[in-house]
Amino acid sequence: MKLDGGVLIANITPFSDDLSVNWVEMAKRTRDLASVPGIRGFVVNAFAAEAPSLSPEERQRAVAVHRENALPDQTIVAAIMDWAPPATIRRGEEVKEAGADAVMVCPPYLSAYNANHSPEYAFHYHKEIAEGLDLPMLLFQLASGDQLSYPHEALIKMASEIDQVVGVKMAQAADCVRYDRDYFALKSLNKNIVCLPSVGSTFFHNLSTGGDGILSGLAALAPYECVEMLRLVEAGDLHAARALHARLAPLNHAIYGFPYADLHTRYKEVAFMVGAISSPTVRSPQLRLNVAELDRLWKSAQSAELRPIPGADGVRPRLVA
């Protein structure tokens, strides 16, 4: 299994109008995105995929569909979100059977849980899962203001003391100081921890500090641009990387802006706007965006001049006058 040196796409789940999963479109979308040079693999069943709204059977089938339609050397990482280790381990066994190469364990769901004040929960949660599940594990780190963000010391303890931990999704967002501190400490450990920045609006800043690739839902609608940003920074061409960052900034600011609960709906809406999926339908509790925000997204998507995704139907017309 290889995680570094490329882009992992946190893929979107396409739904039909009746809210059933469109498995045919998921297969096609996976094949199309897998053909983009520089795509290292897929993260399935993450928040970009609206995974909390999927049944365990749907999540397992989604992994199988990605495994069947990705290239043989591309990695399939299954995101798992639950609140108790036994259930998380069962979900892990199911996705392993479906073809997952690794799991990304999301922070546990606990009543009134604040990871910063109760770091012991995070360590024991991940350790118990690692002891019961024979798969490499990625941790999921968030910005310091997030209730589910692990304290720096807890993150480093999990990465260093849990053998199965091989990488971290670095979702520190605008908290670039937190990113730097976490990154340098992870890279100082006596084991190789792959660090994968995930927030499109800070790719340039994070990768300038250092990173081993990208893991993001933004790559589901802008795969070429994510691959190019990684390539430019790795090559030391910061002038070109800064220019790409500036071109994408209006779109990134629209996608990653407040309210943050709409982030993954915005991914889907823009993917629909650029013809990558046939419908922007979301399952509850996600909601469609209002007309004013859809128009703002459309304008920012046009200014980004995204390269068309293979198999896309083409840019759809502006949604409002």
Image (spheres, grey):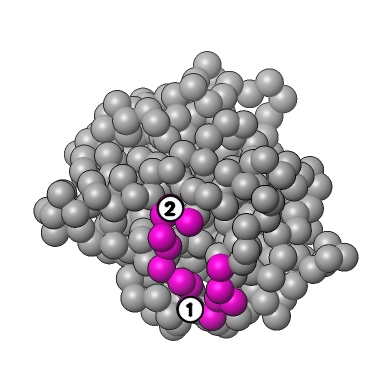
SS assignment for the magenta stretch, majority = loop
The verdict on residue 304 being magenta is yes
Along the line of sight, which residue is nearer the eye, 106 or 307? 307
Q: Residue at x 67, y 40 (%)?
A: 292
Q: Residues in magenta?
A: 302-315
Does label 2 or label 1 sit earlier along the sequence? 2
Where's the N terminus, which quadrant? Answer: bottom left
**Residue position marked by numbered label 2 in the rendering:** 303
Q: Kindly tell me whether residue 200 is visible in this rendering.
A: yes
Spatial separation of the CA atoms under disc 2 and disc 1? 20 Å
Q: Is residue 222 magenta?
A: no
Query: Does residue 135 sit above or below 69 in this rendering?
Result: above
Q: Residue furthest front?
A: 321
Kindly state the secondary structure of the residue where label 1 is placed. loop
Q: Which residue is mark 1?
A: 310
Callout 2–callout 1 Cβ contact below 8 Å: no
Left or right for 126, reference 14: left
Image location of residue 135, percent across then percent down: 49, 61
Nearer to us in this view, 144 or 103: 144
Disc 2 marks a residue whose amino acid type is: Ser
Q: Nearer the viewer, residue 108 or 231?
A: 231
Given the image, on which type of amino acid does mark 1 rest?
Pro
Residue 94 visible: no
- On residue 51, the disc is none
